[in-house]
Amino acid sequence: MQLIHLVAAAAATVLVGVLLLALVARRRRYLHVVDVGTDRKHIVVLGGGFGGVYTAKALEQLLGDREDVEISLVNRENYFVFQPMLPEIVSGSIGLTDMVSPLAHLLPRTNVHVREVENIDFAAKTVTLSPGFLPRHNVLTYDHLVFALGNVTDFRGLRGLPEHALPFKNLADALNLRNHLIKALGEAAIEKDDRLRQQLLTFVVAGGGFSGVEVVAEINDFVRGSALDYRGRIDPKEIRVILLHNMDRILPEMTEKLAIFAQRKLAQRGVDIRFGTRLSAATGEAAILDGGERIETKTLVSTVPSSPHPLIQSITTLPKSKQGKIEVDEHLQVKGTDDVWAVGDCAAIPLVTGGNCPPTAQHATRQGETAAQNIVAALAGQRQRKTYTFKGLGMMGSLGHHSAVAQVFGLQISGFLAWLMWRGIYLMKLPGAARRTRVLLAWVLDYIMPPDSVQLKLSSSAGITQEHFEPGQDVFRQGDVGDRIYIILSGEADVVQMRDGKEVFCTRLQAGEFFGEMAILNGSVRSSTVRCKAAMDALSLPKREFGLLTANLPELKSSFEQVKHQRMERDEATDAAPPTISHFPAPVTKPEAKPN
């Protein structure tokens, strides 16, 4: 009995101690926060990735409790994402919030502005941020400005990719991809149409670098593991996972030996690697390769190409490299300036060994520390600057299913040992002991339990979207349910009908015309097939949103009803079934002007 009391007392003592430590830590965190003053020096960091966070973190350590310097960080989210673990969100190996850390906790002395940057005035030394709850801008003045905006996925110039390819760059992309995979498997399990079923069970990833390889590995593990939940309704042999790469081997950053090992492992697990192929276009039904081959799929993930942040592209006064990155010197100071700095993927940073730094976390974190030291030296009036000399420790890449490749300190490691090293190193680099513990527990559970296929729907409707169609592709078919109205932005489409077992041409639609409203207004199925004639871009408005517009805009509804009656009268005169198109704009009546 005494032993039980002693154990209970010890446990209570430990619990009280942990609570006191937590309260002290919380107290210290808030004591570091200082009020904004008008006579302080102000350092503004743009971006909350590795480069931006580690710059601000190093500044906090170097400046200590000095109240004559204020630090601000601007980011569109209030959290920091540990990017190397992003692919594991897709498979559910770790929880959604286990790899994100609130910026306010990581940077207790920094003012975090969860806004978009709209404009920078280098002459006035101001940064204009987007409005918050009130429709007014927030303007920050700075003494030193740090660019750490990273790269963004850029599909411009590639037909159909902005509309139909899934990017993989941030947390929202990972969650969206996971939800899409779960939906595709669920639909395939009940789909009777063989062609659609095959599209749903074909998963294509473009890009054979680290991101593409890690994503395709997680997708492959997840869809093949989750297929078992459908009790025989999905045959694993039906699943196709395809990786497209325009070179003769994947992972070109690593040695040929490790790249070949990675290729062999992925192939053994069912991944079809297509070498020397480049993605040139996409539709809602297919990935189109540069040679013209079409891969029928409802899931296309593209990890390439990437480009500098749009804000950097819009600034013409900064010196930039051919790739559009900000040019800096060996001290990470933007060339031609004395108060602007750049770190991370958005900067062209020279290496002491030649060339520029690769876009990896190990470089971005150390660039942030170097930039912080040089900024503090500049504030103190010191002319001596620290040169960025880091050469890199190596590279690692996960292949899923407890396998990886690693090239560290000149050693080449592959398989299970490399996987343990990959997880161990990234676990130690993950900020915060609490998150390390959560991730470690999640990994242990993932090792012994099947994947979780819960779909998180965060929005009720996709709203109006833009879609791309390639020649020969059906926008919709005769007999389909009327669920959308389309407005052609560019290209052409043919309207055809099946009459007496023969396909009859009705008319051709061009830019500015709309179609698909008749089935919605009539509450019927599609009476015609609309087929893309020339590569076409169109706005797609769902039935729900179309109904809201016509219900709240009587003039718009009246215009569509007028078109409907005109079409029906003309089709009755020609003894033809009414097609689901209107090849002239709806004449929306403008309301009369009212006095102010």
Image (cartoon, rainbow, N blue to C red):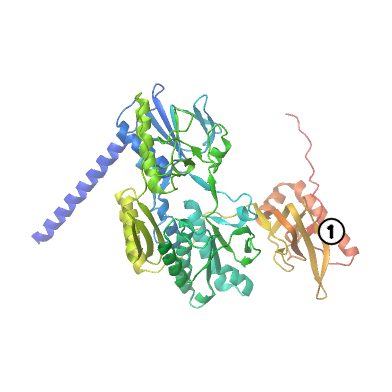
Amino acid tagged 1: Arg
Residue sitting nearer the eye, 502 or 391: 391
Residue drawn at (51%, 24%) of the image? 124
Q: Residues within 10 Å of mark 1 (few under 14, many from 20)?
A: some
Residue sitting nearer the eye, 395 or 257: 257
Residue sitting nearer the eye, 550 or 322: 322
> Measured from the top left, where is residue 389 in percent x and y?
36, 41
Instruction: Tell me the element at label 1.
Output: helix
Q: Mark 1 points at which residue?
A: 567
Residue sitting nearer the eye, 179 or 48: 48
> Left of 438 or right of it: where is 571?
right
Quadrant position of residue 566: bottom right
> Measured from the top left, where is residue 119 in percent x and y?
55, 33
Residue placed furthest toward the right:
573
Residue placed furthest toward the top:
39
> Measured from the top left, where is residue 243 in percent x and y?
52, 64
> Left of 325 or right of it: where is 557?
right
> Measured from the top left, where is residue 170 in percent x and y?
48, 51
Image quadrant for the C terminus? top right
Residue drawn at (63%, 60%) of the image? 290
Image quadrant for the N terminus? bottom left
Quadrant position of residue 33: top left
Q: Against 229, is 493 above or below?
A: above
**Is residue 86 among what the camera can see?**
yes
Q: How many labels sit on residues? A: 1
Residue placed furthest toward the bottom:
232
